[in-house]
């Protein structure tokens, strides 16, 4: 939460906490604490949910801590006919197993309600404003969910394309554009075939030159168009995208950085530079978010080693560390590692963290897996345990983002 918001609502928070404590203590005699609650934060869960907690539209809430609750009556807002779908993520059309269940899980934060987006009210709030996502294909996955949800309130939504923007949609009833700019590393990068001066490094075919101080062209000119921006980078910072035959080589002020940086040190520098660029060039009134990593769920091997995610249920809380803690050195450890670097780079800035990692870590059941809508896709690309089925988990991301935008613009 922005510190400004916090200080503004501190009295409210105080009031809320006091009333919660009161409520809690008044109910205590009727409620035996669960023996399996080792930590004090967990014991918050045992606060009975009825009678309803006092609600305030300005109630700042940690949407990121909570649990998934199965609710068989819950249905997605859109279906496979949404025109903004990408084939590989259109799990209803691809007849992915278990789709009913995937969309019956509801994310329930520990200390407050997460309302489902009301597309019409949200677009009304956004009238004459634009939302942009900048980053890798996980941001595009997020975008498609956002567009399909919003379209429910404006069936006249049109595909939107402009130089520099990858894709998006315009909602004519509200004069709102929501779009995605593909910039997988955020910084500018380009392929350079092997030069004589590169010497005889084993197997080198060329390099990807990354200018750590220069944003990629795809988002270099958007500062005045958007009122809300959501940045991300992460999934390309790995040796599977840039192996040693075609490595990233980092440049600053037009010169190669010497000695050459390891990939994650390069990432740190790119993050620093992109964050300060955003702070400098984008207006203060623009609401800025940075989405943390979307976790992958490859079980039993990497994507190209038959790693699979054909699970029917979300993970249980105690399983998360086994899958994701870097100390366990598993296939899926990189999300938390990168998150630490990103959180570091954002300290002290006006850019709000959109920490969707933890809630998504549970959802091993919600990737396209083998249902990719194309024969042979699995044989060639392996299972997709990285992107998300739509409708699916990113719809919850949309609920959270839209709520934070609402709070951001109401204050
Ligand atoms: C639509 O929104 C843009 C800002 O994104 C604004 O400049 C323009 O005037 C609006 N158009 C109408 C018809 O209100
Ligand atoms: C993946 O599975 C196929 C078919 O079961 C097998 O032939 C292949 O060796 C496996 N690859 C790896 C890297 O385990």
Image (cartoon, rainbow, N blue to C red):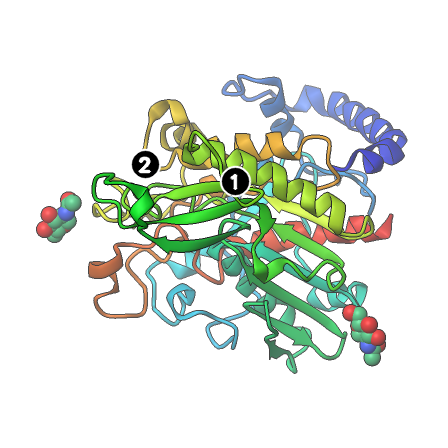
Instruction: Say whether disc 2 or disc 1 marks the residue closer to the N-terminus.
Output: 2
Residue in front for this viewpoint, 233 or 158: 233
Closest to the camera, between mark 2 and mark 1, is 2
The image quadrant of residue 94 is bottom left
Instruction: Please tell me whether mark 2 sits on a helix, a strand or a loop.
Output: loop
Residue in front for this viewpoint, 396 or 6: 6
Residue at horizontal 64%, vertical 80%?
155
Q: Position of residue 57 (x, y in %)?
A: 82, 47
Residue at horizontal 64%, vertical 24%?
31
Q: Position of residue 189 (x, y in %)?
A: 48, 52
Residue in front for this viewpoint, 2 or 259: 259
Q: Quadrant of the N terminus?
A: top right
Q: Is residue 157 above or below residue 312?
A: below
Name the residue tied to disc 1: 357
Name the residue tied to disc 2: 331
Residue at horizontal 64%, vertical 58%?
220
Q: Residue furthest front?
A: 196
Residue in front for this viewpoint, 389 or 115: 389
The image quadrant of residue 168 is bottom right
In this picture, residue 398 sits left or right of residue 82: right
Residue at horizontal 37%, vertical 33%?
323
Camera sees residue 353:
no
Q: Position of residue 224 (x, y in %)?
A: 76, 61
Q: Is residue 405 above or below residue 64?
A: below
Q: Position of residue 110 (x, y in %)?
A: 63, 34
Contact, CB < 8 Å: mark 2 with mark 1? no
Image region (quadrant) for ligand 1:
bottom right
**From mark 2 to mark 1, how far is it between C-alphas?**
16 Å
- Numbered marks: total: 2
In this picture, residue 22 sits left or right of residue 299: right
Is the residue indicated by label 1 positioned so its CB lies within 8 Å of ligand 2?
no
């Amino acid at each position: 939460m922005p510190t400004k918001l916090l200080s503004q609502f501190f009295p409210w928070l105080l009031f809320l906490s006091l009333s919660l404590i009161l409520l809690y203590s008044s109910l205590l005699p009727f409620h035996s604490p669960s023996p399996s609650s080792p930590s004090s934060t967990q014991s918050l869960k045992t606060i009975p949910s009825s009678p309803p907690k006092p609600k305030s539209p300005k109630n700042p809430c940690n949407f990121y801590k909570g649990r998934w609750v199965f609710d068989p009556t819950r249905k997605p807002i859109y279906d496979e006919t949404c025109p903004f779908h990408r084939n590989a993520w259109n799990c209803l059309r691809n007849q992915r197993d278990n789709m009913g269940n995937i969309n019956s899980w509801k994310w329930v934060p520990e200390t407050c309600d997460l309302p489902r987006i009301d597309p019409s009210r949200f677009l009304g709030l956004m009238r004459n404003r634009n939302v942009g996502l900048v980053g890798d294909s996980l941001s595009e996955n997020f975008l498609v969910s956002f567009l399909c949800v919003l379209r429910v309130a404006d069936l006249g939504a049109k595909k939107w394309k402009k130089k520099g923007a990858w894709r998006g949609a315009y909602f004519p009833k509200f004069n709102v554009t929501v779009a995605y700019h593909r910039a997988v590393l955020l910084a500018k990068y380009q392929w350079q075939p092997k030069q004589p001066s590169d010497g005889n490094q084993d197997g080198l075919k060329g390099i990807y030159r990354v200018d750590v101080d220069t944003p990629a062209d795809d988002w270099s000119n958007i500062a005045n168009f958007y009122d809300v921006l959501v940045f991300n980078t992460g999934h390309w910072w790995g040796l599977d995208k840039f192996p040693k035959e075609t490595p990233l080589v980092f440049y600053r002020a037009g010169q190669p950085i010497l000695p050459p940086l390891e990939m994650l040190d390069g990432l740190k520098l790119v993050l620093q530079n992109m964050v300060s660029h955003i702070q400098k060039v984008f207006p203060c009134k623009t609401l800025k978010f940075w989405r943390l990593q979307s976790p992958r769920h490859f079980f039993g091997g990497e994507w190209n080693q038959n790693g699979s995610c054909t699970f029917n249920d979300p993970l249980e809380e105690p399983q998360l560390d086994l899958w994701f803690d870097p100390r366990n050195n598993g296939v899926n450890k990189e999300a938390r590692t990168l998150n630490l670097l990103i959180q570091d780079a954002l300290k002290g800035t006006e850019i709000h963290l959109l920490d969707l990692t933890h809630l998504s870590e549970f959802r091993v059941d919600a990737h396209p897996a083998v249902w990719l809508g194309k024969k042979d896709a699995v044989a060639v690309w392996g299972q997709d345990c990285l992107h998300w089925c739509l409708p699916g988990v990113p719809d919850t991301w949309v609920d959270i983002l839209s709520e934070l935008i609402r709070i951001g613009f109401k204050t």
